[in-house]
Amino acid sequence: MQLEQKNVLLGISGGIAAYKTPDLVRKLVAAGAKVRVVMTDSAKEFVSPLALQAVSGNKISNSLLDEDAEAAMGHIELARWADIFLIAPATANVMAKLSHGLADDLLTTLALATPAPIVIAPAMNQQMWAAPATSDNINILNQRGVNFIGPASGEQACGDVGYGRMVEPEEIVSALGEHISHAAKDLQLFAGKNIMITAGPTREALDPVRYITNHSSGKMGYAIAEAAEEMGATVTLVSGPVNISAGANIRCKQVISAQNMLEAVMSDIATQDIFIACAAVADFRLAEVPTHKVKKKDETLTLSFEQNPDILKTVAALKNKPFTLGFAAETNDVEAYARSKLSRKNLDMIAANDVSSSELGFNSDRNALTVITKNSKTELAPASKKVLAQQLLTLLHSEYTATQQ
Ligand code: C5P
């Protein structure tokens, strides 16, 4: 999920929708986020700090003048800790203060002190939402890049009907995930970097009209290429025969066999910073491909195969090798096989997926990965291949940066 390992600072202001925030925190934590909560004084009238402490697993911050809280994590430290600052519910009053840069309590002070993107889920009476002062404040905040989730329309606590209801926790969590992945793109983590990706199956000829291949659809490799390009990389995609096409800004080299793929990779590898081997390369090819179509003259047919080159291993053995990420598609003992591949092929990182499930992996639009390096293991839960590609590249980026120091 996009929120995996993300530090979410949740600011709660004093609206009736605050009673939904323990559920919101629970859902953020379930999505893999680390959550710290800051409340205004009036929020404490609607929801118990103790309940929020229990679900977030962290002490609640409320006042700039609280010595205990400041000793545990000072407000500037808290502002820096956040990957994203979510204010939910955000009252008309808090939005007015934010739009004018007031900092008369901990929540509004943090909004000024944090470099993290701010996302607001407003909650107020429909008339207050429609008030010209609120509209002006929304415009100012929008222009500053603050993002809004909702409000939703419907029946309100006061009996009115209209816009102003806080969006339900589940929707806030998924919208926040979207904001985080947009932020990853905005960061352009791979600006100035060359990334080469292999994708799809290879096709090995049996004679001039027949071949053997496998079920790889190329979707994962293409999703990685697209995500890498969006994150600023110059992408070269070396692709076996698939039914999908690459984006306009991706340089795509089409190949057929494993031998073709090796040649296409090696001719450009010297300029690459990162090599990602996502292709399902055939391990064997026919020792000698007949020049004419094989005839059906005998009851049985015996073919003799020889091993194909291991493209990934060849790249990882180069003297000036790029950072290498390999894939391990396994049906059993996924982690153990991935670890042995990591060391046997001298890789920097390996992404293992269990292809025994028909819901995930080969040909599916979704996947789940276990990403392993020499010193770490991260589980990326089932998600669309595009979301997984973004998460995988974010992990790869921190590992890659560490190897460059
Ligand atoms: O050894 P195995 O085929 O399971 O390794 C999988 C990884 O190695 C994948 O990243 C795949 O793209 C790469 N590979 C390769 N050339 C081969 C076989 C696999 O690049 N001939």
Image (spheres, grey):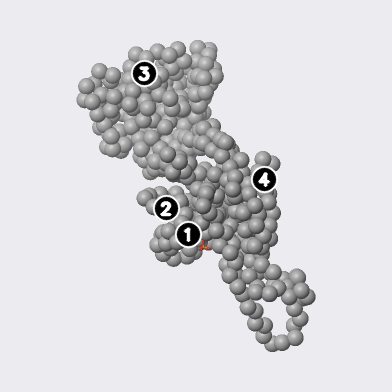
Q: Tell me where residue 20 appears, x and y as whole percent.
A: 37, 33
Is 38 displayed left or right of 373 in the figure? left
Q: Is mark 1 within 8 Å of ligand 1?
A: yes
Q: Residue furthest front?
A: 319
Image position of 366 with respect to 86: above or below:
below
Q: Residue, x 57% and y 36% (percent of image)?
A: 192
Q: Residues within 10 Å of mark 1 (few under 14, many from 20)?
A: some
Q: Earlier in the sequence, mark 1 or mark 2?
A: 1
Question: Is residue 199 visible to the viewer in this orientation of the structure?
Answer: yes
Query: In this rendering, which labeled residue sits more in front, label 4 or label 3?
Result: 4
- Number of numbered markers: 4
Q: Tell me where residue 359 appears, x and y as whole percent.
A: 52, 58
Q: Is mark 4 within 8 Å of ligand 1?
A: no
Image position of 233 with respect to 67: above or below:
below
Q: Residues within 10 Å of mark 2 (few under 14, many from 20)?
A: many
Q: Earlier in the sequence, mark 4 or mark 3?
A: 3
Determine the image quadrant of residue 107: top left
User: Which residue carries the number 1 mark?
Assistant: 345
Q: Nearer the viewer, residue 225 or 263?
A: 263
Query: In this rendering, which labeled residue sits more in front, label 4 or label 1?
Result: 1
Q: Residue, x 69% and y 41% (percent of image)?
A: 248
Q: Secondary structure at mark 4?
A: strand
- Disc 4 vs disc 1: Cβ atoms closer than 8 Å? no
Tell me the quadrant of ligand 1.
bottom right
User: Which residue carries the number 3 mark?
Assistant: 109
